[in-house]
Amino acid sequence: MAQSTYSIRMDSELKKDFDSICEDFGMSSTTAINVFAKTVVRERCIPFEIKSGNRGMEAFNALRESARKNGIQDMSIDEIDEEISRARKGIGR
């Protein structure tokens, strides 16, 4: 199988800690990254949950679900702009 190089940048302290933990597991950081990549390809997802430190995404998803329930998730940009304009003018309340 042909090999390719993947170059990434990360914080020096993070790299040192990552290399140390990988060594504790008996593998190199390259092996650990390959394990991660193979798992992503095999499972077709990131093999752990990614969370935001803030609640912005939760609020966005709640609004998205509300729009879906109210049948307005397919509004065009023009319709959204008009809705915002009316709300700002206090029309339709």
Image: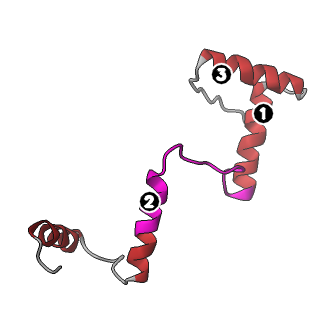
Give the mark nearer the N terminus: 3 vs 2.
3
Residue 32 forms part of the magenta stretch: no
Which residue, as the protein is rendered here, is positioned at the far left?
A: 89
- Say what amino acid the circle numbered 1 marks: Ala
| Residue under pointer 2 | 59
State left or right for residue 25 relative to residue 77.
Answer: right
Q: Is residue 60 above or below residue 89?
A: above
Q: Amino acid at mark 2?
A: Ala
Q: Nearer the viewer, mark 2 or mark 1?
A: 2
Q: Closest to the observer: 3 or 31?
A: 31
Quarter of the image where the N terminus is located: top right
Label 3 – label 2 distance at C-alpha:
31 Å
Label whose residue precedes the other's in the sequence (2 or 1): 1
| Residue 47 tag number | none
Cα distance in 3D space between marks 2 and 1? 34 Å
Within-10-Å neighbours for mark 3: few <14, some 14–19, many 20+: few
Q: Earlier in the sequence, mark 3 or mark 1?
A: 3
Residue 80, position as x, y percentages in the image: 22, 70
Indicate whether 42 appears above or below 15. below
The answer to whether any part of residue 1 appears in the image is no
With 56 as the anchor, is 6 left or right in this view? right
7 relative to 13, above or below: below
Q: Amino acid at mark 3?
A: Leu
The residues colored magenta run 43-63
Q: Is residue 90 above or below residue 42?
A: below
Q: Position of residue 53 (x, y in %)?
A: 53, 43
Q: Which residue is mark 3?
A: 14
> Which residue is denoted by mark 1 in the rendering?
32
Q: Classify 10 Å Cα crowding around label 1: few (below 14), some (14-19), many (20 and above).
A: some
Label 3 – label 1 distance at C-alpha: 14 Å
